Image (cartoon, helix red, strand yellow):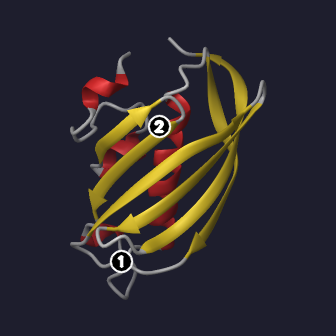
Amino acid sequence: MKLEQYIGQQISFSPSKAGNWLEFTLDHIEKGHAKISLTVRPEMTNPYNNIHGGMMSLVIDECVGWAVISLESESHYTSMNLNVDFLYAIKSGDRLRAESRVVRSGKKVINVECSVFDMEDRILAKASSNLIVTNMKIG
């Protein structure tokens, strides 16, 4: 699948139902690199009207997944870990952008970094994730 054809579109066809629920836009995709953006909705927030940590982790995990998908592997990968530093809050109604980059793609494990920013380039969160190959083939 040519992922580049979906740049600028809201993604609703991902195998990840949670990812589709985010209603994110694919802003950029190339081998080992993905950028997405979305508006924080009220159902994504904590009692303070800021994005909930679990929702931020979902945004990061989805962006990481798109960077991995862009490698066009023959097999699926699954997360071994996701380490997130929450650095700044963002409110409901505000837009954020996430950018992930594959640091190393080994035979069994892929390491990916992700950063999330508001639209004024304040860093909201940064993360790293290791994903391991599964025996499930794509296609």
Q: Residue at x 39, y 46 (%)?
A: 35
* Left or right of residue 20: residue 81: right
Q: Is residue 88 above or below residue 131?
A: below
Looking at the rendered structure, which numbered label has been put on residue 111? none
Label 1 sits on what residue type? Answer: Ile
Coordinates of residue 27 in the picture (x, y in percent): 30, 43
Q: Is residue 51 above or below residue 104?
A: below
* Left or right of residue 139: residue 104: right
Element carrying mark 1:
loop
Mark 2 near mark 1, Cβ–Cβ under 8 Å? no
Q: Is residue 18 above or below residue 91?
A: above
Q: Residue at x 28, y 38 (%)?
A: 11
Q: Quadrant of the N terminus?
A: top left
Label 2 sits on what residue type? Answer: Trp
Q: Nearer the viewer, residue 121 or 82?
A: 121
Q: Residue at x 78, y 24 (%)?
A: 107
Q: Nearer the viewer, residue 2 or 41?
A: 2
Question: How far is the residue under mark 2 from the one under mark 1?
Answer: 23 Å
* Left or right of residue 88: residue 4: left
Q: Residue at x 78, y 28 (%)?
A: 108
Residue farthest to the bottom, as pictured: 48
Q: Report the number of discs.
A: 2
Looking at the rendered structure, which numbered label has been put on residue 90? 1
Element carrying mark 2:
helix
Looking at the rendered structure, which numbered label has been put on residue 66? 2
Coordinates of residue 74 in the picture (x, y in percent): 61, 14
